[in-house]
Image: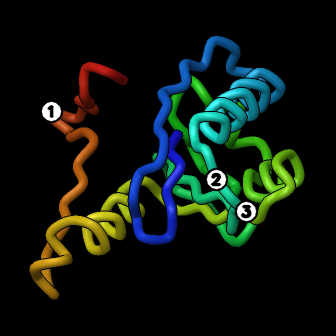
C-alpha cells in the first residue's frame, strides 16, 4: 500500500502480507495497514479517495474480477469498488495493474521526458501449452 499526494510524491509505503484470505481477513489487514500509513504522515489531510490495481480482468463500474490471482481469489466473488468504498468511507477507483503501472510511468517516469512511449507489462508466458509464470506466483 502507498500514500501519495497530488504531486505524485510518495508519503508512506507498506507491504501487507495476507495471512487470512477470507473477505473479513483481507478487509481487516487493509484497514490496519491504512491506519498505519496515515499515522506515519504528520499532516495527511483529507483524502480524495482510494485507487487500487489488481491483476486480472474485471467488468464494469463495480469491478467484478474474473479469475483473480491467489491468494485473494475470494475477491473475485464480490463487487470490489462498492465493498471497499463502504468499508473505508471513500470513493474507490480500480484498474488492472498493467494499466495503472503504465499511467504511473506516464505521470512520474519516462512520460516526463517523452510524449509517446510503449509500456510492456508481462506477467507470464505460454510454453508448449503450459503457462509459465514468475517464481513468486
The label number, if any, that marks residue 40 in the structure image: none
Tell me what residue is drawn at x 27 percent, y 67 percent. Answer: 108
- Where residue 20 sits, quadrant-wise, is top right
User: Image quadrant of residue 17?
Assistant: top right
Instruction: Name the quadrant of the C terminus.
Output: top left
Residue 76 on image: x %, y %? 68, 42
Which SS class for mark 3? loop
Look at the numbered disc 2 and give the secondary structure of its residue.
loop
The residue under the point 65% across, 58% down is: 50
Q: Residue furthest top?
A: 19
Rendered image: mark on residue 44: 2
**Mark 2 or mark 1, which has the lower sequence index?**
2
**Contact (CB < 8 A) between labels 3 and 1?**
no
Question: Quick one: label 2, few (<14), some, or many (20+) residues within 10 Å?
Answer: some
Q: CA distance from mark 3 to mark 1?
A: 51 Å
Which residue is under mark 1? Answer: 128
- Which residue in the protein does label 3 denote? 46
Q: Residue furthest front?
A: 42
Relative image position of residue 56 (x, y in whole percent): 49, 49
Gap between marks 2 and 3 measured at Cα: 7 Å
x and y, in percent, of residue 89 in the image: 86, 55
- Tell whether 110 sits left or right of 84: left
Amino acid at each position: 500500500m502507498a500514500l501519495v499526494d497530488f504531486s505524485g510524491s510518495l508519503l508512506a509505503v507498506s507491504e501487507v502480507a495476507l495471512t487470512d484470505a477470507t473477505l473479513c481477513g483481507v478487509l481487516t489487514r487493509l484497514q490496519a495497514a491504512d491506519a498505519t500509513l496515515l499515522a506515519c504522515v504528520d499532516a495527511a489531510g483529507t483524502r480524495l479517495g482510494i485507487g487500487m490495481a489488481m491483476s486480472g480482468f474485471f467488468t464494469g463500474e463495480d469491478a467484478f474480477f474474473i479469475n483473480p490471482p491467489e491468494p485473494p481469489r475470494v475477491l473475485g466473488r464480490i463487487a470490489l469498488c462498492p465493498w471497499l468504498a463502504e468499508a473505508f468511507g471513500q470513493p474507490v477507483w480500480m484498474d488492472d495493474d498493467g494499466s495503472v503501472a503504465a499511467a504511473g510511468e506516464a505521470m512520474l517516469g519516462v512520460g516526463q521526458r517523452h510524449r509517446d512511449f510503449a509500456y510492456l507489462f508481462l506477467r507470464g508466458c505460454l510454453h508448449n501449452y503450459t503457462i509459465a509464470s514468475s517464481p513468486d506466483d
